[in-house]
């Protein structure tokens, strides 16, 4: 009976999440108009905290231009969706490679705490992509606690003045209906990295004082052509 109840709960959760995604009105923050190109604001679900767009536009114009160009060229290929799975997927790798071509690199900082002359190592997690003050993470199909890791990393690195802005690229909830239609919902489910799992964590202070910008990949970026 318990096993059946669990299956029923999972089925209800899927139906509820998918149904909500079909009714969802996805909008980017209105405050971003004039700071982020309109085509990006239409193609992605974009949100900011602590004036991240102004900081990027004023002090990190090259990094912002890189991000915009990569997102503008990006398409969510059919085979990348079907692949699913956690870890570094082909979809995440395609974004990585496009940023690498613009001199973004993975980065890990060596940090430590000094307590009464005793040094205690406190290493940070490696950031997917980093370029001169801006850290960027790509969260496609990891479990949603990875958001906690990313935000804590941004908070710590910002406090240490290692970064000035944190950026996350992830899935808009709008994609749930598409995955259901393609029959691949089980590869993603409700416990992976969705925008609705990220926003409460940021609003709850998970990133501390770090300015943060997030881009949610929307359905209109889907390329249904099969290779």
Image: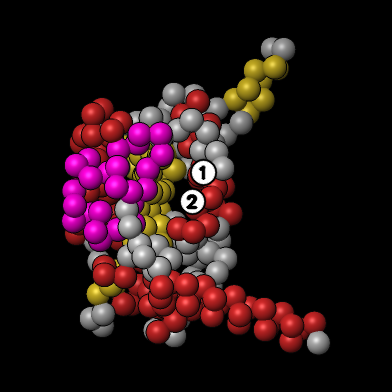
Compared across the picture, whether 158 is left or right of 129 comes to right
- The boundaries of the magenta stretch are 29-53
- Say whether residue 47 is magenta: yes
Give the residue drawn at x 23%, y 81%: 225
On the question of residue 157 being in view, the answer is: no
Q: Which of 183 and 80 is in front in this view?
A: 183
Asked if the residue under mark 1 is in contact with the one under mark 2, i.e. CB atoms within 8 Å, the reply is: yes
Give the residue drawn at x 51%, y 38%: 207
Give the residue drawn at x 40%, y 34%: 50
Q: Is residue 193 above or below residue 168?
A: below
- Corner quadrant of residue 107: top left
Q: What element carries label 1?
A: helix
Q: In this view, does 197 lie above or below 31?
A: below
Q: In this view, does 7 lie above or below 189?
A: below
Q: Give neighbour class at mark 1: few <14, some 14-19, many 20+ (Cα, 10 Å).
A: few
Q: Nearer the viewer, residue 106 or 206?
A: 206
Residue to which mark 1 is pinned: 203
Q: In what quadrant of the picture does the C terminus appear?
A: bottom left
On the question of residue 158 being in view, the answer is: yes
Residue to which mark 2 is pinned: 199
């Amino acid at each position: 009976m318990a096993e059946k109840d669990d299956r029923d709960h999972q089925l209800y959760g899927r139906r509820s999440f998918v149904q909500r995604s079909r009714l969802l009105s996805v909008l980017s923050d209105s405050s971003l108009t004039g700071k982020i190109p309109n085509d990006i604001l239409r193609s992605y679900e974009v949100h900011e905290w602590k004036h991240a767009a102004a900081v990027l536009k004023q002090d990190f114009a090259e990094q912002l231009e890189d991000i915009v160009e990569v997102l503008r060229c990006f398409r969510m290929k059919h085979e990348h969706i079907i692949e699913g799975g956690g870890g570094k997927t082909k979809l995440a790798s395609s974004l990585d490679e496009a940023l690498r071509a613009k001199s973004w690199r993975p980065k890990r900082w060596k940090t430590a705490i000094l307590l009464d002359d005793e040094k205690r190592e406190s290493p940070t997690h490696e950031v997917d992509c980093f370029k001169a003050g801006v850290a960027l993470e790509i969260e496609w199909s990891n479990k949603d606690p990875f958001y906690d890791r990313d935000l804590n990393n941004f908070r710590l690195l910002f406090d240490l003045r290692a970064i000035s802005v944190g950026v996350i690229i992830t899935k808009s909830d709008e994609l749930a209906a598409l995955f259901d239609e393609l029959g691949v919902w089980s590869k993603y489910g409700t416990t992976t990295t969705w925008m609705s799992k990220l926003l409460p964590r940021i609003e709850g202070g998970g990133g501390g004082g770090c300015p943060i910008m997030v881009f949610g990949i929307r359905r209109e970026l889907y390329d249904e052509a099969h290779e």
